[in-house]
Structures are given as C-alpha cells and as structure tokens.
Image (cartoon, rainbow, N blue to C red):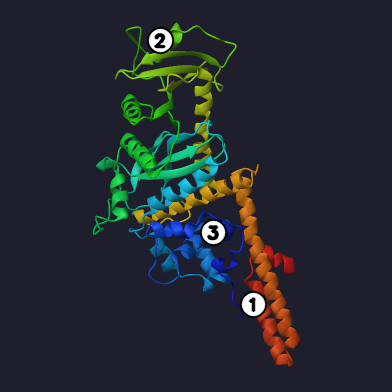
Amino acid sequence: MLHQKSLSEQAKTRFSILFATLQIGQLLRKAGINKSFGPSSLAVFQILFSLVFEGRNWFRLLESERGASLPGKDVIYRFLNQGTFAWRKFLHSFALKIIQHFESLIAPSRTRVFIIDDSVLNRNRSKKAELLARVFDHTTGRFTKGFTMLTLGWSDGFSFAPIDFVMLSSAKLVNRICEMKEHIYKRSHGYKRRLEAFTRKPDAVVVLLQRALSAGFTADFVLMDSWFTQAPLLRELHAMGLSVIGMIKEMKQRYRLNGKLMSLKELYSTLPKNKNNEILGAVIVETACGLRVKLVFVQNRNKRREWLAILSTDLTVSADEIVRIYGMRWSIETFFKFTKSFLKLGTEFQGRSFDMLISHTTVVFSRYLVMEFERRQENDAKSLGGLFFLFADEVRDLDYQTALQQLMTFFLQIAKAKTKLEKSNVFCQLREWIVGLPSYIKGLFI
C-alpha cells in the first residue's frame, strides 16, 4: 500500500509558513517544552494545533488511513499531561510577539487596553476530573460542574490577543468534587497551576496583571464588567498605576458627593438630564475607601427607560471617550464564543488530568493568536469564523492533492504491470484505497 503522508509532512501550507515566521519552535524550547525521544515537541504541537481544522477528533484521525504514520496515542497524551512544561511562559512570549506586531501597525496615540473576564467550562458528564468543582455560571444563574477560566486579554480596538489565564476550581472545600492528585512534584509548573485554582477571583486578577506587566505587556486601561468592579480591587489596581474602566450595578455601595453618601440611583436623580443624547450625565465622586472616580450614566439600549453606569478611575477622560473605550471590552466575549464554538475549547480533549486542561487551553489560545495574526497581517476583512473555514478548506485541499498524487501512482503501476496477476493486485489496492478515503473525496470518484 502507498504511504500516507502525516500532518507534519503535509504542512507545506500557510501553517508551516506561520510557524516559521512566528518562531514557535524556538518559543517552545525557551519554555522548556522539549521531548527526549520520539517526534519533536514542535511536531507534536503542530499536530495538536492543526487537529481542529481536520474536522475530526484525534481518535477518528488515528482510525483513518493516515493513522499509521501519525504518532501513537500515548505520545500525544504524554505531551498534554506533562506537568513540567512552562505553558504560561510560552503563551506570554507568543502573545507578546503577536502584540508587538500589532503595535507596529498602529499609531502611538491609539488606546490599548487590558480586558479581564471569566467564562465557565462545563464538565457536566465528568466525575473524576482533577479539581472538578461546582462553579456558578453567570449566564444561566445556576451552579454547574466544571471550571472557571479567568482570562486576561489585550486589545487595540481591532484585534484581541489572549495573554494569560487562570483555571479556577473553587476556594470552598464543600464545592470541590475532586481534589488534587497526590505525589506531584512541588516545584513543577503543574503543581503551581493547581495551587492557583484555589485563588479568589479578585486576587487572581491582581496577580494576572502583575505578571503581564513584568512580562513586558503595556496598556492604557483595564476593562472589566460589574462583577470585578469592586472598591478593594480598584484600590489595588490604582496603587499599581493602572486606570480602570468598568460597569457598575446598583447595590449597597455608596459614593460620596458634597459630603453625602449616596447610592447610584440617588446620584442619577441629582444630575441634569440630556434626553437627546445616549450619555445621560457624568459626575466625579469618592468611593467609601477614598478613591476618586468618574461615573458616567448612559441609556440602556435594550430598555430605554433604564440606565447603565460606567466607572473610570481616570478623571481626565471625557464621558464620550469612557463609553467608547468600554465598548472595546466586547472583544473578549466574542473570543469566548469563538474558541468554544470553533476551536473546541474544553471539548476536544477531556482527560482527567489538570495538566491536560492547562496545556490544551494554551493550544486553543495559540490557534486564536495565529488566526488574529493572519487576519491582521493580510489586512483581512473576514471574520474569524470565515478565516477558520478558509484554514479548514486548505487542510482539505492538502487531502485532494495527496489523493491525486496517489491516484497517479496507481495509474503508473498499472501501466508498468505486465501480467494479469500484477494488474489484479494493483486493482485490489486501488479498491481498498478508495474505501479508506474521506467521504468528500470519495464522492469525486463515484
């Protein structure tokens, strides 16, 4: 039978060019992501990276004709379950390279922001996944089994780049379904990531931003939704020199105006109304901890009779600019939607190990970074969804090219066959080859 080409052998496409341009192999080595034997770490990473564009999972790929030339199942799972790999260092260096390219394309005066938000990775069918917990899902208002992925991203208003994440379990023992596995090397990166899983969200936000600043990332503002816009966290970020813009809700907190403590509703009632503008008014107040902030009240587009409040710790920014900058936060919502719907975040591999959860999430983030880089590099007006299907079509084009090359080889073998037995053997091979083809290629021969 003819030798089927592996993904690493076929990858003479846009992927291999992008991998070489972005020096992903070098970044993997610097992060200590190396293998002592077998396929290189770059080859295994490229297989994992390209898998989502194949349109089938790893099991189905191994069962296909191509499976004979691919690394074994154990190679992939050992790579994903390795707790000594510094995946955070790799993601930091990779994202920084992408962002530096974005920086070269924009003016110095353009606003750059950090964006903080969390999303739930559901694992409702899991029972023994490491550090599995009951976590609260804000979208449904219910508790579910899974993990909370707290993500830090960077945006310039056109592109979004994920730069770090913390996979949170639950700080409460009663909510944890499974505990950390025993006999883990305490100095490994995997053990440190497990300890992070017990961190409170506000504390994790501070550490994420501290690490990002130390790694060389810069931004003008930190954007967050109402869950994170709390006075203690605002005070910590202000002490770090970071300006915050975030949504706030009407709750028990009070703001000091002219010596009086007032709620958001009371503050809104004191402002002169501008009904001809979506920005209803703005006021500078003090929080209970003494931090001066600017509150901007805007019309709720979904409910015209209601208003929304946006807070800024930078008092020099105009109300219009505060609203415009806060609108950049929506890019992280589209990031969560895209990675879950197209890039199979949390669903492609569902092993029990916490190390696998971290490594696969990093691979998914890397896919997104490469696609954003390609879209920006080519000044592509396509959405990321359209770009995803373009990449998937290119992977299929590789299959078409390989199939045509193999078919021509069969014709050459038939032409060289001198006896009926030799021709019969070639025809048997041809029939078996057609049976093993993907359905979308097989249809071309029927």
Q: Which residue is mark 2?
A: 266
At mark 1, the secondary structure is helix
Q: CA distance from mark 3 to mark 1?
A: 37 Å
| Image x and y of residue 36, in percent | 37, 69
Earlier-in-chain disc, 2 versus 3: 3
At mark 2, the secondary structure is helix
Q: Which residue is mark 1?
A: 432
Q: Residue at x 59, y 49 (%)?
A: 374
On-image quarter of the N terminus: bottom right
Q: Residues within 10 Å of mark 2 (few under 14, many from 20)?
A: few
Residue 239 sits in quarter = top left
Q: Residue at x 47, y 70 (%)?
A: 71
Q: Residues within 10 Å of mark 3 (few under 14, many from 20)?
A: few
The amino acid type, in three-letter code, at marker 3 is: Ala
Residue 93 drawn above or below residue 441: above
The amino acid type, in three-letter code, at marker 1 is: Glu
Of tags 2 and 3, which is closer to the observer?
3
Q: Is residue 422 visible?
A: yes
Q: Which residue is mark 3?
A: 20
At mark 3, the secondary structure is helix
- Of residues 299 and 151, which is closer to you in this image? 151
Q: Residues within 10 Å of mark 1 (few under 14, many from 20)?
A: few
Earlier-in-chain disc, 3 versus 1: 3
The amino acid type, in three-letter code, at marker 2 is: Glu
Residue 270 sits in quarter = top left
